[in-house]
Image (spheres, rainbow, N blue to C red):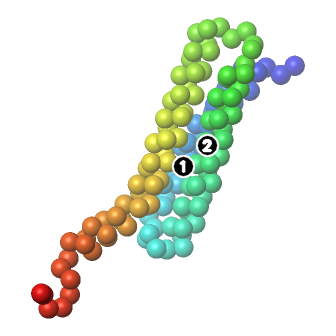
């Protein structure tokens, strides 16, 4: 007999570890030059781990919605809150990855368009 509660808690722990891994990978990526192959490799790892994190969060959410076991209302509410928190973390990570990946590019664009055009003026 499988204890569904323990299984759900293990999946929750797995999701939290994936979250921590993405944060760690973002820190690691910051040590590399944006145009280096190491940066590109770490970025790919981040995307892969973030995707796994999203799958894990969706799995937890689906299992919670389909759970017809004898969870108390308090326990079900606790789990809903935990999944909601993971959903927020996923969204924040996606924004963070996007912002850090393109921050330098956006800064370069701003600088480029602030400079006067070379050559004689009109």
Q: Along the horizontal axis of the image, is 51 left or right of 112? A: right
* Badge 1 element: helix
For the point 21% across and 83% down, which residue is it? Answer: 117
Q: Is residue 98 visible?
A: yes
Q: Is residue 6 visible?
A: no
Report which residue position mark 2 lands on.
Answer: 53
Q: Name above or below for residue 106 compared with residue 91.
A: below
Kindly indicate whether the residue at mark 1 contacts the one at mark 2 (C-beta within 8 angstroms).
yes
Q: Along the horizontal axis of the image, is 93 left or right of 74? A: left
Furthest residue in direction front, as rendered: 122
Asked where in the image residue 33 lies, by quadrant, the reply is bottom left
**Residue placed most toward the observer, 24 or 61:** 61
Q: CA distance from mark 2 to mark 1?
A: 9 Å
Report which residue position mark 1 lands on.
Answer: 22
Q: Name above or below for residue 69 compared with residue 118.
A: above
Q: Position of residue 76 (x, y in %)?
A: 62, 15
């Amino acid at each position: 007999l499988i204890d569904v509660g323990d299984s759900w808690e293990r999946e929750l722990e797995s999701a939290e570890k994936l979250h921590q891994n993405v944060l760690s990978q973002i820190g690691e990526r910051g040590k590399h030059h944006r145009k280096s192959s190491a940066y590109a490799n770490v970025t790919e790892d981040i995307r892969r781990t973030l995707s796994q994190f999203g799958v894990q969060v969706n799995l937890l959410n689906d299992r919670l919605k389909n759970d017809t076991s004898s969870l108390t209302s308090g326990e079900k509410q606790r789990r809903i809150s935990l999944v909601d928190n993971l959903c927020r973390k996923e969204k924040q990570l996606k924004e963070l990855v996007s912002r850090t990946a393109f921050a330098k590019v956006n800064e370069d664009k701003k600088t480029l368009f602030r400079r006067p055009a070379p050559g004689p003026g009109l």
